[in-house]
């Protein structure tokens, strides 16, 4: 089946620390991959995406590279800020039976302390 | 402004009552989704729809029903058959059949059944 596994949180870092949140996936076919971010009490917002192998998505200092050989899409940021505190979701979009289906990981809560 | 609107933001219902959550979008998106979010569970797919008058069950459809009579609207009914309905519900939409299209999310409805 299609699934996403991301590292369990919570993750607590100090400001300016390096961030990695691991994400691996299982999919039939060739999915598109996404990272979404959720701030408290809100819906999800797209952070970045990659649609094919070796693509790198980037936004707001965050990066993730679509690695087909390791079925991974790890999120990284070189220097986190307090404002990055949120829940981060890895997701894949797969076409299944003529329909597109968006599948999410369980989310990783990040807290950045000043 | 284009977007996706869920209403109400907070909803309280007595046990045994059916309740309908509203989701409207003016983005001209074909695909719409309903997710349920529980602490530590991430987002779980309830139902999704690619075109008007057609929808598919997601991973946890039992106790829920939907309709898609208009492109703009995808209401979710939480029935009395849903054993544990208290949760945060998120609606999303995307351009169907567009490779790697991102999903846009509403602000969510927090349903509490007492």
Image: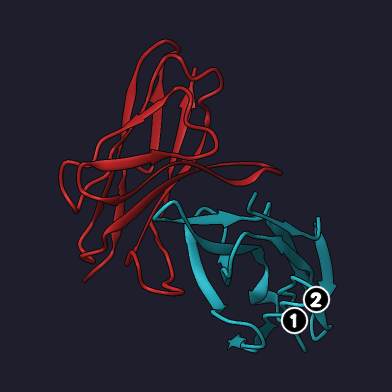
Chain colours: A cyan, B red
Q: Position of residue B10 (x, y in %)?
A: 40, 38
Question: Are the numbered discs 2 and 1 placed on the same chain, yes or no?
Answer: yes
| Nearer the observer, A2 or A41 | A2
Q: Position of residue B17 (x, y in %)?
A: 36, 14
The residue shown at (52%, 53%) is A41
* Mark count: 2
Q: Residue at the left extreme?
A: B70
- Residue B14 sits in quarter: top left
x and y percent of residue B88 in the render? 51, 40
Graded by Cα atoms within 10 Å as few (under 14), some (14 to 19) or many (20 or more), the crowding at tag 1 reads some
For residue A55, what is the image quadrant?
A: bottom right
Q: Nearer the viewer, residue B105 or B63?
A: B63
Instruction: From the top left corner, tell me how far across and down residue B16 is, in percent.
Output: 42, 10
Q: Residue at x 75, y 81 (%)?
A: A76
Q: Which label was assigned to residue A68? A: none
Q: CA distance from mark 2 to mark 1?
A: 5 Å
**B52 w.r.t. A111: above or below:** above
- Tell me if label 2 and label 1 are in contact, CB under 8 Å: yes
Nearer the observer, A75 or A40: A75
B76 or B109, which is in the foreground? B76
Please rate how many residues cluster around mark 2, counting C-alpha atoms within 10 Å: few if below 14, some from 14 to 19, many from 20: some
What secondary structure is found at the residue carrying circle 1? strand
Identify the residue at horizontal 42%, vertical 64% (top origin): B103
Tell me: A94 left or right of A65.
Answer: left
Q: Which residue corresponds to mark 2?
A: A20
Q: Chain of mark 1?
A: A
Question: Mark 2 belongs to which subunit?
Answer: A
Q: Quadrant of the N terminus of chain B?
A: bottom left
Residue A56, placed above or below residue B6 = below
Q: Return the residue at label 1.
A: A76
Q: Tag 1 or tag 2, which sits nearer the N-term?
A: 2
Which residue lies most toward the top here?
B16
């Amino acid at each position: 089946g299609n699934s996403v596994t991301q590292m369990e949180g919570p993750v607590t870092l100090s400001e300016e620390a390096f961030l990695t949140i691991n994400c691996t996936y299982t999919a039939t076919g060739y999915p598109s991959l996404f990272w979404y971010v959720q701030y408290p009490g809100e819906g999800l917002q797209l952070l970045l995406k990659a649609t094919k192998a070796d693509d790198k998505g980037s936004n707001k200092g965050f990066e993730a590279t679509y690695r087909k050989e390791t079925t991974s899409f790890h999120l990284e940021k070189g220097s986190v800020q307090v404002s990055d505190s949120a829940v981060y979701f890895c997701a894949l979009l797969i076409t299944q039976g003529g329909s597109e289906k968006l599948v999410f990981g369980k989310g990783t809560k990040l807290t950045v302390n000043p | 402004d284009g977007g996706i609107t869920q209403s109400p933001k907070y909803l309280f219902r007595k046990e045994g009552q059916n309740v309908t959550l509203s989701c409207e979008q003016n983005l001209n998106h074909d695909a719409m989704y309903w997710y349920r979010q529980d602490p530590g569970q991430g987002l779980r797919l309830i139902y999704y729809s690619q075109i008007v008058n057609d929808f598919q069950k997601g991973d946890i459809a039992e106790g829920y029903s939907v309709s898609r009579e208009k492109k703009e609207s995808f209401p979710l009914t939480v029935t009395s058959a849903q054993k544990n309905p208290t949760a945060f519900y998120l609606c999303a939409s995307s351009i169907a059949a567009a490779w790697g299209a991102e999903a846009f999310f509403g602000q969510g409805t927090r349903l509490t059944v007492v």
